[in-house]
Image (cartoon, grey):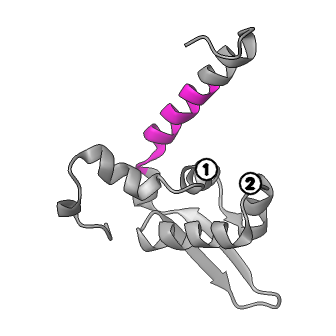
Amino acid sequence: MAKQCSNFTCPVEATISMIGGKYKAVILWHLMDSTLRYSELHRKMPRATDKMLAQQLRELEKDGLINRMVYPVVPPKTEYSLTEYGKTLAPILDALCDWGENYLSETQNSPEGRKF
């Protein structure tokens, strides 16, 4: 959406530019089935600093993958959800999850830590 196609040499590069940030795929994964507040997202990703999480959320919003809804209450309430465009990433995120589960299973069951 916000990125131009002419900047990429292949479709994989374009995809990675959209979801390849340190926490972008994880954020998208957590938003697949629910709308979450900033604090809820941060609890699900405790290693993410406030600065990094805020930056990744801004980039995902700018690229049209997530919605940011701010409610005018005190204290401010901000919720994040996937856009319709963001929801099209579900098969990619599901495949990443499946691969990760397989990898973790293989490494946990291997005496040397990794079978591959």
Instruction: Determine the image quadrant of residue 22.
Output: bottom right
Q: Is residue 99 magenta?
A: yes
Alpha-carbon span between mark 2 and mark 1 = 8 Å
Instruction: Determine the image quadrant of residue 48.
Output: bottom right
Which residue sits at x=64%, y=16%?
Answer: 114
Question: Residue 106: image x %, image y %?
Answer: 65, 15
Question: Residue 87: image x %, image y %?
Answer: 46, 52
> What is the quadrant of the C terminus in the image?
top right
- The residue to which callout 1 is attached is 26
Tell me, yes or no, whether the two marked residues, 2 and 1, touch with CB atoms within 8 Å: yes
- The residue to which callout 2 is attached is 45
Most foreground residue, 69 or 109: 109
Most foreground residue, 77 or 115: 115
For label 2, the SS is: loop
Query: The residue under label 2 is which amino acid type?
Result: Met
Which residue sits at x=51%, y=41%?
Answer: 93
- Tell me the crowding category of disc 2: few under 14, some 14 to 19, or many 20 or more residues within 10 angstroms, Cα based: some
Q: Is residue 59 left or right of residue 31?
A: left
For label 1, the SS is: helix
> What is the quadrant of the N terminus in the image?
bottom left
Segment tinted magenta in the rendering: 88-101
Most foreground residue, 114 or 54: 114
Furthest toward the front, the residue is 112
Query: The residue under label 1 is which amino acid type?
Result: Val
State whether the magenta stretch is mostly helix, strand or loop.
helix
The correct choice, above or below, for 61 with respect to 86 in the image is below
Q: Is residue 110 left or right of residue 43?
A: left
Which residue sits at x=63%, y=25%?
Answer: 101
Question: Residue 97: image x %, image y %?
Answer: 58, 33
